[in-house]
C-alpha cells in the first residue's frame, strides 16, 4: 500500500494519519461540511468533502462516496478508525470488491462479531465461559420472563447489534420488565436499525477487563495484555488503564490465554479486543470489538507497540514476527502503568450534557510520560453539537499505578480550558477517590459514589 484513505474524523483520524506518515505512506482525509475546519483534514496530504448534502454523521457513512474518493485519489487502503463504518461488513465487502484493502478483520469476522449472540456462540465453542443468557434472540416479553423465572433477577436485556452502551437495560424485578424491554427494543431500533434483543444474567459489580489482540494473515496471534475499563458511566468507558492492578499473574495469564484461544479459533486478523466481565472468582466473555479502540493508547504506552501501524502492516500482508519484528508472546513484556482519561465537553453539573461553543482559552499539559490525542481543541476552535463530545484523550505513564495517578492529577490540573464546559474537575474527583486509588473501582463505581457529584 502507498496511500491510505482515512474514513473517520477527529482524534482517531489524526492518530491514523500520524501512523501512516511514520510508515511513509500518503494520506487522504474525508470531511463533512460541518467539519470544514476539522484539523484532521489539514493533517492529511489531501482532503475531500464527503457525502455532500447529507447530515453531519451520515456524510461519514456514505460508503459509495468514500470508495469513489479512494478510487479517484488512487488510495489502495482504507482505515475506518472506530465508530462510523469500522464494523460494517457491507463496507468491508465494498472495499474488497473495489480492489481496496480494508484495514481491519475479514468480512466474515466482522459479521460474526457484529452480532453479540453469535459472538457468544463462537466464544463458547472456543471453551470460554459466557454469562448465562438466552442462546437465541428473544422474540417476546414472555421469553424474557421465562428466562428471569428460571435464572432469577436481576437480568439485563441487550441489543444483539449493540454498541456504545446503547440498547441495554437492567431489570431488577418483574414489574420493571415490560418498560425495560420496550425501551431496549426501541433504542436498539433507533441506534442500530434492528431491534433484536437477548437476555443475560446481570452481574453485580464486576470489573470490565479486556485483552488487546493482534493477528496476522498467517495465523499468528499475539495478545498485548489487558486493560481495566471498569470506570464507566451508563455502560460507557470513562477512564481506562493498563495493566489491571488487581489481577494476579495467574489470572492475567488465564484471561489473556482465553482471548488468544478465541482469536485463534477464528484465525482472527488485524487488531481486535476481547472483552470480559470479571467477578471475584470468574471471568466471563462479553464481546469482541473487531477494530481499534479508543483506549488502545494505554496498551501502546506499556508495550511500546504501535497498534495502528500494526493494523496497516498486517492488512498489507506482513507477518507479526518476520516483518513487524514483534517479540514472541513469551518475550513480550509490559512496562509500568498507563492511565487514560477521556476529556469531553460534557458538563457534570448538567447531567453530562455535551456543551458547545467557542473555546476561548486552551492550554494543554505536557511533560514526562504524558500523551495527548486530540486535534480539534485549541483556542478559537468551535465545538459543534454534531459529533461526539471527546475533546482530548489524556494519557500518562509511570512506573506504578500510584505514580500514574499522581501524574494524571498533575496533568489534569495543568489544563486551562475556557469557553466550553469540560469533565476535567469530575475526572480529578474520580482519580483522587480512595476506591479508585485502591484499584477497587468496578463498573458501578461512578453511579454508586454520590460524592463524585458534590
Ligand atoms: P457495548 O457493546 O454497548 O459497549 P457491552 O456488551 O460491551 O456493550 O457492555 C458494556 C458494559 O455494560 C460492560 O462493560 C458492563 O459494564 C455492562 N454490562 C454488559 N453486560 C452486562 C451483564 N451481563 N452484567 C453486568 N454488566 C453488564
Image (tube, rainbow, N blue to C red):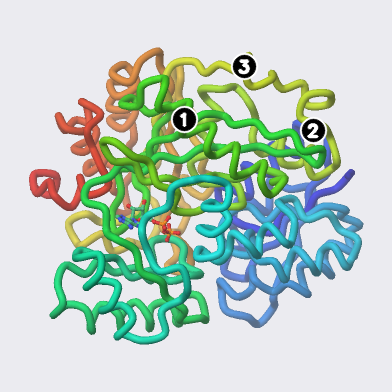
In percent of width and height, residue 380 lies at: 46, 51
Of the numbered discs 1 and 2, the one sitting upstream in the chain is 2
Q: Is residue 308 left or right of residue 424?
A: right
Q: Could you say which is closer to the camera, residue 98 or residue 424?
A: 98
Q: Is residue 369 above or below residue 343?
A: above
The answer to whether any part of residue 361 appears in the image is no
Numbered circle sitting on residue 254 = 1
Residue ID for mark 2: 23
Q: Is residue 398 above or below residue 109?
A: above
Of the numbered discs 1 and 3, the one sitting upstream in the chain is 1
Q: Is residue 395 left or right of residue 416?
A: right
Answer with the quadrant where ligand 1 appears in the image: bottom left
The answer to whether any part of residue 367 appears in the image is yes
Q: Nearer the viewer, mark 2 or mark 3?
A: 3
SS class of the residue under badge 2?
loop
Q: Nearer the viewer, mark 1 or mark 3?
A: 1
In percent of width and height, residue 8 lies at: 64, 58
Q: Is residue 300 above or below residue 122?
A: above
SS class of the residue under badge 3?
helix
Query: How crowded is the residue under tag 3: few (<14 C-alpha within 10 Å), some, or many (20+)?
Result: few
The part of the image, by quadrant, that contains residue 85 is bottom right
C-alpha distance separating marks 1 and 2: 34 Å
Residue ID for mark 3: 330
Q: Which residue shows up at 13% across the image and 80% down it?
A: 175
C-alpha distance separating marks 2 and 3: 27 Å
Amino acid at each position: 500500500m502507498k496511500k491510505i484513505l482515512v474514513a473517520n474524523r477527529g482524534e482517531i483520524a489524526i492518530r491514523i494519519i500520524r501512523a501512516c506518515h511514520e510508515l511513509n505512506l500518503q494520506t487522504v482525509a474525508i470531511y463533512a461540511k460541518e467539519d470544514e475546519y476539522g484539523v484532521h483534514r489539514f493533517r492529511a496530504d489531501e482532503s475531500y468533502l464527503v457525502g455532500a448534502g447529507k447530515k453531519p454523521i451520515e456524510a461519514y457513512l456514505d460508503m459509495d462516496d468514500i470508495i469513489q474518493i479512494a478510487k479517484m485519489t488512487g488510495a489502495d487502503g482504507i482505515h475506518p478508525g472506530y465508530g462510523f463504518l469500522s464494523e460494517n461488513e457491507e463496507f468491508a465487502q465494498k472495499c474488497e470488491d473495489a480492489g481496496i484493502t480494508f484495514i481491519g478483520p475479514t468480512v466474515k469476522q466482522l459479521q460474526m462479531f457484529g452480532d453479540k449472540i453469535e459472538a457468544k456462540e463462537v466464544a463458547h465453542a472456543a471453551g470460554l465461559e459466557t454469562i448465562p443468557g438466552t442462546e437465541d434472540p428473544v422474540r417476546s416479553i414472555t421469553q424474557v420472563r421465562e428466562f428471569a423465572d428460571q435464572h432469577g433477577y436481576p437480568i439485563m436485556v441487550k441489543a444483539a447489534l449493540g454498541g456504545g452502551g446503547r440498547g441495554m437495560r437492567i431489570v431488577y424485578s418483574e414489574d420493571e420488565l415490560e418498560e425495560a424491554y420496550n425501551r431496549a427494543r426501541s433504542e436498539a431500533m433507533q441506534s442500530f436499525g434492528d431491534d433484536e434483543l437477548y437476555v443475560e444474567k446481570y452481574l453485580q459489580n464486576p470489573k470490565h477487563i479486556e485483552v488487546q489482540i493482534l493477528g496476522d494473515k498467517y495465523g499468528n496471534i499475539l495478545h498485548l495484555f489487558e486493560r481495566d475499563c471498569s470506570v464507566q458511566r451508563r455502560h460507557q468507558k470513562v477512564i481506562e488503564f493498563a495493566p489491571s492492578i488487581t489481577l494476579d499473574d495467574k489470572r492475567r495469564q488465564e484471561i489473556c490465554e482465553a482471548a488468544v484461544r478465541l482469536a485463534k479459533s477464528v484465525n482472527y486478523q488485524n487488531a481486535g479486543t476481547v472483552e470480559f466481565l470479571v467477578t471475584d472468582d470468574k471471568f466471563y466473555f462479553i464481546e469482541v470489538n473487531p477494530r481499534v479502540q479508543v483506549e488502545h493508547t494505554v496498551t501502546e504506552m506499556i508495550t511500546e507497540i504501535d497498534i495502528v501501524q500494526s493494523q496497516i502492516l498486517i492488512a498489507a500482508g506482513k507477518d507479526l514476527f518476520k516483518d513487524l519484528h514483534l517479540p514472541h508472546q513469551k518475550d513480550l513484556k509490559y512496562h509500568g502503568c498507563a492511565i487514560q482519561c477521556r476529556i469531553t465537553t460534557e458538563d457534570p453539573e448538567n447531567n453530562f450534557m455535551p456543551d458547545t461553543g467557542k473555546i476561548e482559552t486552551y492550554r494543554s499539559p505536557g511533560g514526562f510520560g504524558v500523551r495527548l490525542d486530540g486535534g480539534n481543541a485549541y483556542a478559537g476552535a468551535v465545538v459543534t453539537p454534531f459529533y461526539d463530545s471527546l475533546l482530548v484523550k489524556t494519557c500518562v505513564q509511570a512506573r506504578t499505578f500510584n505514580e500514574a495517578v499522581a501524574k494524571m492529577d498533575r496533568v489534569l490540573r495543568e489544563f486551562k480550558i475556557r469557553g466550553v464546559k469540560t469533565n476535567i474537575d469530575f475526572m480529578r474527583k474520580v482519580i483522587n477517590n480512595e476506591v479508585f486509588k485502591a484499584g477497587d473501582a468496578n463498573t458501578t463505581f461512578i453511579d454508586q459514589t454520590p460524592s463524585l457529584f458534590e
